[in-house]
Image (spheres, rainbow, N blue to C red):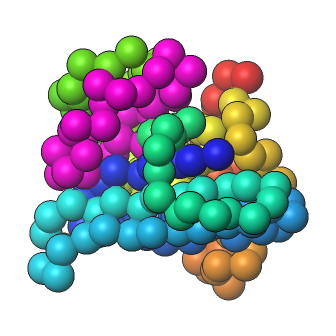
């Protein structure tokens, strides 16, 4: 299963990719993560490519993502050519304010502003929505990933966010 996170610097896109990988490993999956970001500080795109598989991963690139998270215009612009190749089976979670290229994929809009979620929490909230919907990962897997990545107050805050967002998400 291929997952693509498209965001901007400062949105913790790479960290969300890491948490997704840890969540997958907690369920016995093999994982791969590749990150793409410029060397500037807090400017530009941030992209994480994650592959989750029950067996060996022979190719770590993405060919047909199952899920895309579109969280900032910078990330979408970096991979805009991909949208025309997405199938109807691809699920796209996109920030409500973003303009996306034309695509056949199923697009679900997320009103981050209405939820009063800061930019740095968008990626984790999107993962919580995916888990809450029962797609590709469970809430238990995501919580396990968080426990492997964070400690103390950071873990408590992340767990609280994930549980609240997942509970709101329709299955």
4 displayed left or right of 84 = right
Q: Residue furthest front?
A: 58
Residue that appears at 29% across and 25% down: 84
Tell me: 48 left or right of 82: right
Looking at the image, can residue 137 be seen? yes
Q: Let me know if residue 114 appears in the view.
A: no
Quadrant, the C terminus: top right
Looking at the image, which residue is at 24% across and 19% down?
102
Q: Name the image quarter holding residue 59.
A: bottom right
Compare residues 119 and 123 and report the one nearer the observer.
123
Q: Position of residue 56 (x, y in %)?
A: 75, 65
Which residue lies at the image location 68% right of the left edge and 56% below the top edge?
52
Q: Quadrant of residue 103?
A: top left
Measuring from the top left, give residue 163's x and y in whole percent. Answer: 70, 49
Residue 166 lies left or right of residue 59; in this view the side is: right
Q: Foreground residue, 131 or 32?
A: 32
Q: Quadrant of the N terminus?
A: top right
The span shown in magenta is 69-96
- Asked whether residue 71 is drawn in magenta, I would say yes
Q: Nearer the viewer, residue 122 or 40?
A: 40
Query: Residue 117: x, y in percent?
Result: 40, 48
Residue 103's place in the image compared with 136, above or below, is above
Where 7 sits versus 157, above or below?
above
Image location (x, y in percent) of residue 45: 21, 60
Name the foreground residue: 89 vs 152. Answer: 89
Residue 47 in magenta?
Answer: no
**Given the current orientation, which residue lies at the most extreme right position?**
28
- Identify the residue at horizontal 47%, vertical 44% (top origin): 63
User: Count the marks: how many?
Assistant: 0
């Amino acid at each position: 299963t291929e997952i693509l996170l498209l965001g901007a610097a400062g949105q913790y896109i790479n960290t969300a990719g890491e948490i997704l990988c840890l969540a997958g490993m907690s369920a016995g999956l093999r994982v791969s993560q590749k990150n793409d970001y410029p060397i500037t500080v807090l400017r530009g795109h941030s992209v994480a490519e994650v592959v989750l598989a029950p067996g060996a991963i022979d190719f770590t690139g993405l060919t047909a993502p199952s899920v895309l998270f579109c969280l900032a215009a910078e990330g979408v612009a970096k991979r805009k050519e991909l949208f025309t190749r997405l199938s109807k089976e691809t699920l796209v979670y996109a920030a409500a304010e973003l303009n996306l290229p034309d695509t056949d994929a199923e697009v679900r809009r997320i009103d981050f502003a209405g939820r009063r979620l800061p930019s740095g929490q968008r990626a984790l909230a999107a993962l919580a929505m995916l888990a809450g919907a029962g797609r590709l990962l469970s809430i238990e897997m995501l919580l396990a990933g968080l426990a492997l990545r964070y400690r103390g107050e950071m873990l408590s805050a992340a767990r609280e966010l994930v549980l609240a967002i997942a509970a709101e998400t329709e299955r």
